[in-house]
Image (cartoon, helix red, strand yellow):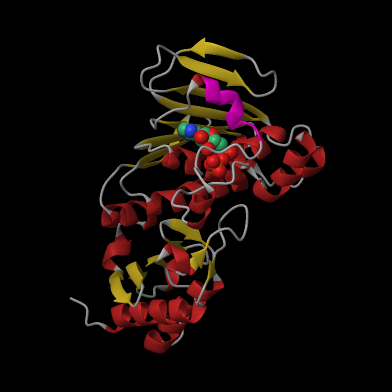
Amino acid sequence: DELISQIAAGEVVERPASVVRELVDNALDAGATQITVRLLAGGVRLVSVEDDGGGIPREELPIALRRHATSKIGSLADLETVGTMGFRGEALAAIGSVSELSLLSRCAGQPSAFLLDGRSGELRPAARAIGTTVEVKELFFSTPARRKFLKTDATELAHCIEAVRRHALARPDVGFAVWHEGKLVEQWRPGTREQRLADVLGDDFLSQSVAVDQAIGPIRVTGRAGIPDAARSRADQQFAYVNGRFVRDKVLTHAARSAYEDVLHGQRQPVYALYVDIEPSRVDVNVHPTKIEVRFRDSREVHQAVRRAVEAALAAPRA
Ligand code: ADP
Ligand code: MG
């Protein structure tokens, strides 16, 4: 089972940022309103994610680390309508198989928190407010071949921050903080979506973008599309969400790009944050373990909806 987990880890855990993504997913699933990420050496030596969510009951701590252990599917029918960010129950097992993982958690109604050491399996009472802290130390320490593929700490840190940015743009109602080597490097307070966009993408993003908001058939597209500005034209500033989940998707990217080409003739890497809400049965989120890819039942309708929504926004007279 350890070996299977390590193989699964190959798909789920590529670098510290993958750990950040999975742990923040779990914190959001647990209903956190504040999430604090602490990193050492770009996350290679430590990724710690602290939340104020519902916590994990003492008896479920060891189970959470097992493969296919998930508290998020009640029945097979739920598989069709996965509302939460994760459901496979693979992430913690996979991460634990290539690191030193510990879980510190406390639920409402429990007299204390409990700390589970993933390596030894030791479980003991500890101190903590309600919520969970997951610590992942020495990523890939036992698989030096994979550790070798990691980049400099600065690069790994940048990827970790990017992972948090993606979540932060999806959940403006949740506060996020990122610490590196004991220094606060990012902090986003809870607020409106507009506020979060300004905080994450820069204050000038609001004045240099237009609101997108259009429903076409079963698809609603909201967000903001940046007005071209050479200085901001970067490949990593396109954020697309499907039903609240960050995705990388050719259909969406192409639709947005087409809209820019039609209306503004040319701008290839505009800044945007687009939120596509679509009836869950029209999209399959289980294409890849990291859930970053989706498959639409009818990609043409999605392409058209996004293209038209962005076109309408860009073509509208600006105040
Ligand atoms: P999944 O998220 O797909 O269920 P994971 O391996 O990521 O699988 O997590 C396993 C289980 O551990 C979750 O289903 C949940 O019950 C529990 N868990 C993990 N992280 C947290 C957290 N931060 N707060 C509460 N429960 C958690
Ligand atoms: Mg998960």
Nearest the eye: 258 or 213: 213
Residue 106 in percent (x, y) is at: 44, 21
Image point 25% across, 52% down: which residue?
192
Residue 8 in percent (x, y) is at: 71, 45
Is the residue 311 above or below the residue 292 in the image?
Answer: below
Magenta segment, prevailing SS (helix, strand or loop):
helix
Image point 41% across, 36% down: which residue?
35
Left or right placement of residue 116 versus residue 317 in this view: right
Is the residue 30 above or below the residue 151 in the image?
Answer: above
Quadrant where the N terminus is found in the figure = top right
Give the residues drawn in magenta, as a range: 59-66
Residue 98's image quarter? Answer: top right
Nearest the eye: 164 or 131: 131
Left or right placement of residue 244 versus residue 1 in this view: left
Quadrant where the C terminus is found in the figure = bottom left
The answer to whether residue 296 is visible is yes
Left or right placement of residue 279 versus residue 189 in this view: right
Is residue 61 shown in magenta? yes
Image point 65% across, 45% down: which residue?
15
The answer to whether residue 42 is visible is no
Residue 253 in percent (x, y) is at: 50, 73
Residue 303 in percent (x, y) is at: 46, 79
Is residue 10 shown in magenta? no
Furthest residue in direction left, as rendered: 319
Nearest the eye: 294 or 298: 298
> How many numbered badges does the structure rendering display?
0
